[in-house]
Amino acid sequence: MSTYILVDTANTFFRARHVVRGDLDTKVGMALHITLNSIKKAWKDFDADHVVFCLEGRSWRKDYYEPYKRNRQETRDAMTPSQQEEDTVFWEIFDEFKDFVHTKTNCTMIQHPQLEADDLIAGWIHNHPKDNHVIISTDGDFAQLIAHNVKQYNGVSNTTITHEGYFDDKGREVIDKKTKLPREKPNPEWQLFEKCMRGDTSDNVFSAYPGVRKKGTRNKVGLLEAFADKNTKGYNWNNLMLQRWVDHNGNEHRVLDDYNRNVTLCDLTAQPNDVKEIINNTISTVETKNITQVGMRLLKFCAKWDMQRIADQAAQYAQPLQARYENDKG
């Protein structure tokens, strides 16, 4: 049995732009530091065996559902010249970091033009069912994958999500600011159901039933009642799913149709069969790398980007980068 660190690479790298104050050089330096430090910490804390960097493609979802992530381009178009310059520099550094990982380390790097990192992370877990997995990401979409052998580590907030709950870097339960009690343990099935019903504004996935209540009233079924009836498909499930509503363009929608569309978009195990085949083929063709002197190569990379703090502990940071993929395990 192996333990894999699965890095949501772009998410981890670009998150620094939103959490670090300072000039461009400071933000870029912190992006590299947060990424490498997250890997080092997860490697040590979870006694890992290999690191897998998962990268973004264009995404098959844009062909399946035209509005998907269309808001991202609108955000980019609204950038000021200084923001555009920062964006360009970040992508240039990100490309150099990817090249370093790909050519100077033994980490696995997987990418496909039609797949998102989420697809590859879920696919890796599916293809290594007997192994343990630690997802490095701040993305809440991975809550649906949490299981006895799957954890999520947030390198920005230093918190870990397991099937038993939310924990800080000292292993203490994270306290909910509203209730003042430990955060409830994840309920992946419910969280995925709620997401498919409410949609995802960050990805421009529209709600299957705008305005639906979490808890129903005397005359109207809510999400909780429908979810409790999900497996039996009884009265409450059908009462909710067969409702119809009209959007602002006058188009009529049936809740069940839009819910099923969102399941295809949001459930990381429900991709169309041809997409699943691409995922499985991409992962099954991964080969073991045999790069030597990874520590020395890391020192050169640190020198180029003035990362003295990492260079001072190069042996610790190099350990996860030099571990090869033993694909006969699991």
Image (spheres, helix red, strand yellow):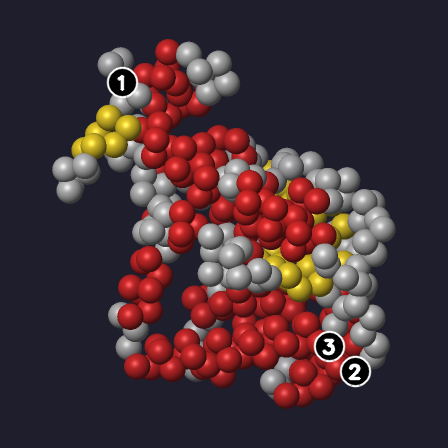
Q: Residue 79's spot in the image, x, y percent?
A: 30, 73
Q: Residue at x 61, y 46 (%)?
A: 277
**Looking at the picture, does residue 256 appear above or below residue 164?**
above
Q: Mark 1 Cα within 10 Å, few/some/many (few <14, many 20+)?
A: few
Residue 46 shows which numbered tag? none
Q: Secondary structure at mark 2?
A: helix
- The residue wearing badge 2 is 296
> In the picture, residue 324 is in which quadrant?
bottom right
CA–CA distance between discs 2 and 3?
A: 10 Å
Q: Residue at x 27, y 18 (%)?
A: 220
Q: Residue at x 81, y 45 (%)?
A: 330
**Looking at the picture, does residue 35 appear above or below residue 310?**
above
> In the picture, residue 50 is in which quadrant?
bottom right
Q: Residue at x 38, y 82 (%)?
A: 85
Q: Secondary structure at mark 3?
A: helix
Q: Mark 3 or mark 2, which is nearer the start of the sequence?
A: 3
CA–CA distance between discs 1 and 2?
A: 65 Å
- The residue wearing badge 3 is 104
CA–CA distance between discs 1 and 3?
A: 59 Å
- The residue wearing badge 1 is 220
Q: In the image shown, does 3 or 43 lie closer to the viewer?
A: 3
Q: Mark 2 or mark 1, which is nearer the start of the sequence?
A: 1
Q: Residue 185's spot in the image, x, y percent?
A: 56, 35
Q: Mark 3 or mark 1, which is nearer the start of the sequence?
A: 3
